[in-house]
Every structure is written in C-alpha cells, then in structure tokens.
Amino acid sequence: MKTLNVVVWNEYVHETTNEKVAAIYPQGIHRTLADAIQKFHPDYAVSTATLAEPEHGLTQERLDQTEVLLWWGHGAHDKVADAVVDRVQARVLQGMGLIVLHSGHYSKIFRRLMGTGCGLQWREANEKERLWVCNPGHPIAAGLDASFTLPEEEMYGEPFGIPTPEEQVFVSWFEGGEVLRSGCCWHRGNGKIFYFQPGHETYPIYHDANIQRVIANAVAWAAPQGRWPGALNAPHAKVAPEPLGRK
Amino acid sequence: MKTLNVVVWNEYVHETTNEKVAAIYPQGIHRTLADAIQKFHPDYAVSTATLAEPEHGLTQERLDQTEVLLWWGHGAHDKVADAVVDRVQARVLQGMGLIVLHSGHYSKIFRRLMGTGCGLQWREANEKERLWVCNPGHPIAAGLDASFTLPEEEMYGEPFGIPTPEEQVFVSWFEGGEVLRSGCCWHRGNGKIFYFQPGHETYPIYHDANIQRVIANAVAWAAPQGRWPGALNAPHAKVAPEPLGRK
Amino acid sequence: MKTLNVVVWNEYVHETTNEKVAAIYPQGIHRTLADAIQKFHPDYAVSTATLAEPEHGLTQERLDQTEVLLWWGHGAHDKVADAVVDRVQARVLQGMGLIVLHSGHYSKIFRRLMGTGCGLQWREANEKERLWVCNPGHPIAAGLDASFTLPEEEMYGEPFGIPTPEEQVFVSWFEGGEVLRSGCCWHRGNGKIFYFQPGHETYPIYHDANIQRVIANAVAWAAPQGRWPGALNAPHAKVAPEPLGRK
Amino acid sequence: MKTLNVVVWNEYVHETTNEKVAAIYPQGIHRTLADAIQKFHPDYAVSTATLAEPEHGLTQERLDQTEVLLWWGHGAHDKVADAVVDRVQARVLQGMGLIVLHSGHYSKIFRRLMGTGCGLQWREANEKERLWVCNPGHPIAAGLDASFTLPEEEMYGEPFGIPTPEEQVFVSWFEGGEVLRSGCCWHRGNGKIFYFQPGHETYPIYHDANIQRVIANAVAWAAPQGRWPGALNAPHAKVAPEPLGRK
C-alpha cells in the first residue's frame, strides 16, 4: 500500500531549451527528484507535474489527494496561473506539506505563503558551497555529516527576505564569501513548509547523494499529521456555547 | 516638529450607509481614531485616508512618507485595488509599521502579509468581552490594568487562521464561551505588524479609553527604527567579496 | 515489539496524604495516565516513576532509553534533585520529548527549559473550563471537537510567564473570566516540549476522555525523530575544512 | 539628564593574567566597551562591573536601576555566584535588556535564559570573519554595509545550541569554512536579549569601528520599553472577575 502521495512539480523549461541542462536532466529535474525520493521511500506514491500540462498538472482533484508537493521553478514563475497558486495555498493551509527548491524562493506560491519579498543576492561563478547542519538531530538532517559540500553551485546570499524561520536546519558557506540560511522550516495553517536552496539547473546538484537524502528526509518530515478542511473558513457561530445575557 | 507620520485608513462605508454606525462615528471611524492617537501623541502628524479617495488615498508618494499605517476595513475588502495592496506590502517590508484593526483581519493586505486564510469564528450578540494582558511590561499594554472589559462587542473566536504570533499581547474572553488571540505581533521584512481585534462598527469601541490607549501605544511601538529600501530586491552580486578559484 | 518508550513521572504526594485525591487516583496520577496512554497506544512501552524512588526513578540508564517523559509535580518541586533535572534537560536537548502537565509549569525542569518564571494566576473555585483548539489539524488535537469542557477545574490564568509558544494548540476560557494559553509547543535543542494545563489533583481530570486523548496524542507528537548526542558539547574543531592563510 | 543606565560586566581575568590581552585592553574589555558605547550615546550613563567586586558589582540595588546589561565572560563562568545569576535573570524578565558577547554564550546567565546547552564549534587560527546583515533595516545593523570583515577572529561555528532566534541580524562566514548565526535576538519575559559573537580577547575586536557601532546600536535596541515587576509571581486571584456558580 502506498503510504504517502507525493507530487514533484517542475516548470520544465530549461531542460527543453538549454543543452547543458538537458544533458544533466534528460528527463527533467522532476524525474530525477521523483526517482530519488522513490529510492529512499519505496512505499511512497511519487508522481510528477509540469507547467505545460493542463492546469499545470495540479487540478483540484489531484491536489486534494496530494500530501507533499515539491516545487522547482525559475524563469516562468509569472506563467503559473493565480488560480493554481490559490489552490496550492489552500491545500498547504489544510495540511499538505510543501518543499520549495532553489529558485522556487521567487515563485508565486512561496512568496504568497511567506508574505515577504523572498529576494536574495545571487551570482553564477561555479563556486563551492558548504552546507552546515544547525540541528544534527533534526529529521531533515538524518544521515548527514556535520557539513557537506557541493563542488559548484550558484551563490545565493543574505539578506534573504523571509520571515524568521521557525527551525533553521542548514546554513551555507560560499567560497566567494557569502552565507545563506539555506534550509528553513515554517508552518502555515496546518501545513509544513521547507525551503532548500541547492539546485541550480546547470550543475548536477540533484544527482548528489547528500542532496537526495535531504530531499527524501524533508518529504517524510512534511507529511501531514492531520487535516484542517476549514482552514480558509470564517464560520458564523450563531449559538453561543455558554449562556448570554447575564448582565 | 512632527515626529512620526501616521495615516489612519478606513473603508468608510458603514458610516455613510448605516444610521446606527453614523450616530457613533459621525465623521467616520478614521476621524475618531486619528483624534485619539493625536490626543496621546500631540507631536505626531496624524492624517486619514479612505477607500473612495483616488488610489484610496494611498499614493506611492504618500506611502513613502508614511511611517505607521492603521487599517480598518470590513465589507469592501474586494474593492481595494491590488496595486495599492502591493504598494502597502512593499512599504511594510521596508519598515513601515502596520496596525490592523478588527475586521481588517480579512483584508487583502493582512492576508497577504500573513500568508494564511486569517479566518475566525464570529457572532453578533452584544456580548461582553474581557481582554487579558499576556505581558504586562509590553509597550502596547502600557498603562492598562491586568484586564479590561468592553460591555458589548462582536465575538471573534478561535481558531484564528494566522501564523503563530511572535508576541502575544492580548488574549480575549467572551461571555458566550469563546476566546481569541486578540492582540498579536509579527515582523514582515523590516516592518512591525500588530493585529488588534476590538472595533465592531455598531458599538462605540473606539471611544473607549482603554482601546484608545492600546492603539496609541501600538502606533508608537510600530514606529520604524530603520529602513530597508531594497526589501523587494534580488541583486546580482557579480563580484565575489572573497577570492574564487582556489580549487 | 514496543515502538516507543514512555515514562510517566509523578511526584505522588497528594495521593498519599489527601483522602479526596486518593479517592480519585487510588494508584496515583501516574498510573491513571500510564493506563490512558497504553489504551490509545497498545504498542508503546509505558512505565512510571515517582519522587520517592531512588534518583526519583530517573537514573541515567533509564533516561537514556526514555523517548517521551511526562511530568506531574506540584507541592514538592524543590525536592527534585538538581542532578536529575540536569539529566532530564540533557536528554530533552538530545531529542527526548517532554509533556509537562498542570502544576508542572512551576517545576524545576520546565522553568529550566523555558528560561522564564513560568508564573500565572490561579484560583480554586470549582469553575468550568472550556478548551478551544487553535489549529484543528494539529496532531495533538486529533479527534477533538472545536472545543470541549471540564465541569470543574482550578483556574490558571494569564499572564503566563513563558516564552511565546512556537505553536498554540489550545487556549482556555474559564467561567470566572480568565483565559490561558493552555496547550503550548516549543523545541529545545532536538527535543519537543508540550505544556498542557488541565489536571488539578482534586478533580477527576485525567479520567476525562478528551483529556486522555490529548495526552495520548501529545506523546505521539513528541516522539523523537532523531537524536543529537552532542547537544551539550562545544567541540574543538582543530582542523579547518577549508584552507586557511590565503591573506 | 542621563537617559539610559547601562552596565558593562566583564569577568576581567585575561587582561590581568595574559600580557597579550593586557596590551590590547590595558584597562580591561569593560572599559573599552563602555567608552565605545559612551561615544555613540553621550547621554547614556555607562558604568562597569567585574567579577572580583563584591557581589560581582551587581548588587540588587544596582541591578534595579540597570536598564541594559552587557556580559563578557570566558574562563570564569563557574565563579559567578548563582544568587547573582538569579538576580540578573529576574531583572531581564522584568524588562532589563541583556547583550551577551562572544564567549558569554557559555555563561550561566545566557544558558539559564535560553534553556539549552549553547555549545558551538570553535578554533583559534587567526582566521578572517565576514559578518552579513540579514535585515538591513534592523536597528542593530544601522549604519553598516551589507557585510563587514574582521581580519582575525576565533572561529565559532554551527551547530550553535540555541533556541531558534526570534530575529536573525547577522550570520557569519569564516575563512576556514564554517558559518555561525552570529547576531541573534530573543525575548524572555519582558526583556530583550541580543547575542553577538565577535570578541575573542587576543584580537582587538572591540576597537573595531563596526563592532563598536553594532554594540552601541544593540544597547539602544535593548532599552526597556516597559517594566513587569511581577514577572516572577504566581498570584492567587481569589475573586473571579466574572460571576461564578451559573451551573
């Protein structure tokens, strides 16, 4: 029996327009991510969705059954329909987990849930990144060493325009001198959100064993432990539970 | 010299369409609030803005000089232009304080900044509310007793669909049995946000001395202590501050 | 196979000195709690420990194997040895869950972990309490209605001298007019902490079906999802992972 | 008129036993810090206190009038009397600001207020540190560039055993590859706490212009905006504010 319904969403544009990216992810970033999650969690039902599909592959019906959604987007954030963003937000508030990857920091859905600009500094210079674990017992860091490196990554640096994370899982060091709060947790409504910075499309980041482990761990961490169907409601409580009119 | 630029925004619809409300606030809720703030802070420059004004009275130029904005809205949330909401959000992220009052919990700007649904239970039954101070030393609670009452208020009750407050200043008890986290603080970017629940338009809430004191305190608390003009930017940091290429 | 090691700690003084309490909890509050948890989770290994046992029943060896600890204390907080408090704190930081009940708000271990005074208002007047769920999808609130009542409980009221909770699960309404943040979550190190207010010894609170459900839910929620053995260390990192001396 | 009473506490041991440190701080770290704060805030009353003074210079009477306390300690944490730690904690809960510097992360008072171990990695290797501002509008970062460097500092690295900061003002990059959440804010009771990592005694860190600016800014930020004298109380509220006995 499949124990968790996971959907990996990818805008899937670079892979079809840039040879370098296509060579790294011939079937798309979503496929690589889905395979990695499946490898760690053979019991999960992991599927994918992309921008070009009708309703971006995220119909209400499908989202209603999705328990954890991963989001990778970069150049086409503006092409994501607001109605789909509304729908994803509603599901997060009800309890669906959301893992936002790399340039997804600038997606409509992440900015919607954070309430802030979510900007940061960036530079493409093939530089080394070292990720440090801030809480070695955190389930998202399970199985990792104290730190691990990526030989080449895009630099994403502070200031990162987010609300203060509720849990800080990773902070990153970049060769060029910058730092980033690169693994951050929040709740919104009944949903858990994890932002994880690595994943620039021109490097084989999602083939890295540590990165795959983090993402697989994060999916398990974000699994809903309950559901709040009325997370968007404002009910009229006509009848008071305690007697009125004592004045 | 005026030490703080404060703007009280009110949708100003009930006062022009409902006799009962007009009797309580003949010049509008905004006027009563502005006068109250001015009474506590004679050195502040307090002005008002309403929905019907061009750009709802919140031009970019005016917002750029506004240091604390108060927001009262109820039935016309949808009539607030998205462009104005964008602009207010940007100013909050840069450092402008925002005080959201009563049914403003359901305004576009509050939901935008929270990232959640912001729903709650409600009932209009003329019931007594008692507000408790959770931190007697908090500047927003300065000058208050341990608790104070409103003889008649609309009930707003939990669950309140907000991110966990960073500081809890008030929790309310209602005669009919409900409770609410009725005074809550957050940061978004460099701006401070305070939500304060009392203020249903058919009761003279904003004429109450304790309520006026809380709002005047909150304006002082929310005053910017710095400004982050680039809160919405994502700058390209072309040149690394530390040498690259050591590999 | 037992899936979670749970220890219910109780000072066990009132039950042996007060007839009324003995009648409600003939085998002690710890026994009633342990039985309730076992009923909901037949697969857990639930045992008990009390103040009078050697090392209060909390030897290092036993704590090392404890995954969730519940704590009920009232009149004998000062009799708990500091060495045992140190030991419990260390285990929480490493990842052990801790459920603090009722007057445990004033225990050494809770105040140690919070860093604050943890005081609150109180009154014994047989008054009705109504507990509201702030997040209906939270795993600790699973299976509950929007609110539930206790016909008679000691009043515990705000201001409650705690750091702002990271998650607010319950807020309580008391007949006499007070309110309390009565179900609160925090992390300390890698451990999860839940404070739950109901449980005055002269009322049969821990026989209540809703209360038992909350406590059983909380134990599952607090189960460690990882372990940080070095949570109290400050290691000398003699060798830098990146080359020094580039200046 | 003096507008803020500030006390700089220093254990003052290295300066009297180590020639290198004495050369950098001939009158002690406390004197250098006090002079720096006074330079930025001529209107503040800035004084000093040290371990060797009776009651470590922190009598109840003096603390009652202290509005912001700075704390530098390293090798003599254990020599600080628990009674003085109790007293400092009580004042923080009532509203006194506390700035904890460098190795003060391991002081009794900081660990008491955090509730955690407060450990971190460390290395003395004369390495470059770069501090990044996470919120350029934060009052503690006023007047700084996006980042600034210290040519030589002791490395303090993650994992840092603290509760998640409520505001992250600085994150540091170290030449040797580590990172640290190096400027962190919390509330405890009504008091504001700021931890700031730079300040190893064998480097002239507290003579650095940026460091002095941060510390002066932090003192202003931590100034009490109210006082909660009863922060440690648990009052018996004998009389219910609302009528009982309606059942």
Image (cartoon, coloured by chain):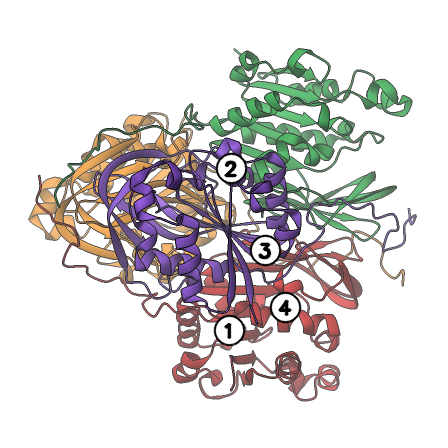
Chain colours: A red, B orange, C purple, D green
* Disc on res. C66: 3
The local secondary structure at tag 4 comes to helix
Chain ID, mark 2: C
User: What type is the residue that disc 1 sits on?
Assistant: Asp
Label 1 to label 3, Cα distance in Å?
A: 50 Å
Corner quadrant of residue A89 = bottom left
Label 2 to label 3, Cα distance in Å?
A: 21 Å
B40 in relation to B165, above or below: above
Residue labelled with disc 1: A78
Chain ID, mark 4: A
Seen from the viewer's position, the closer of residues A223 and B11 is: A223
Label 1 to label 2, Cα distance in Å?
A: 49 Å
Residue labelled with disc 4: A102
User: What type is the residue that disc 3 sits on?
Assistant: Thr
Instruction: Give the mark nearer the N terminus: 2 vs 3.
Output: 3
Residue pictured at 40% horizontal, 79% vertical: A64
User: What type is the residue that disc 4 sits on?
Assistant: His
Residue labelled with disc 2: C111
Chain ID, mark 1: A
